[in-house]
Amino acid sequence: NSPLVDEITNGAEDKEKARQFFSLPQVRQSIEQSLHTQKTMDRLLQIAIGNAENMVKGE
């Protein structure tokens, strides 16, 4: 098991079942895709806020 999966499942009622679930390739891929999307959205927001701040400053 991966240390990350162990950390995620630490508080689970049925730890072994949770480990099996989070070890499934489909679940891992879905989580990876969600994290990637979230990072992309965060970066776009940073860019948009930066551009808005520059517009206010007259740059």
Image (cartoon, helix red, strand yellow):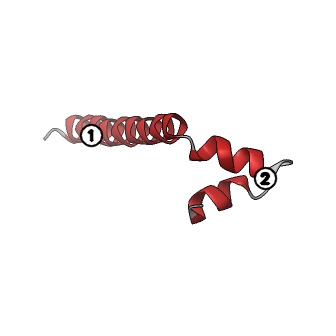
Front residue (pair 47, 14): 14
Residue, disc 1: 47
The quarter of the rendered structure image containing the N terminus is: bottom right
Circles 2, 1 touching at the beta carbon (< 8 Å):
no
The amino acid on which the numbered mark 2 sits, given as a three-letter code, is: Lys
Local SS, label 2: helix
Examine the rendered structure and indicate whether residue 52 appears above or below residue 16: above
Q: Residues within 10 Å of mark 1 (few under 14, many from 20)?
A: few
Residue 43 in percent (x, y) is at: 32, 42
Residue 47, above or below 8: above
Mark 2 sits on what residue? Answer: 15
Amino acid type of the residue that numbered disc 1 sits on in the rendered structure? Ile
Image quarter hosting the C terminus: top left
Direction bottom: furthest residue: 3
Residue 51 in the image: x percent, y percent?
A: 23, 37
Q: Residue at x 27, y 40 (%)?
A: 47
> Which disc, if any, is residue 37?
none
On the rendered structure, is 29 left or right of 5?
A: left
Q: Quadrant of residue 53?
A: top left
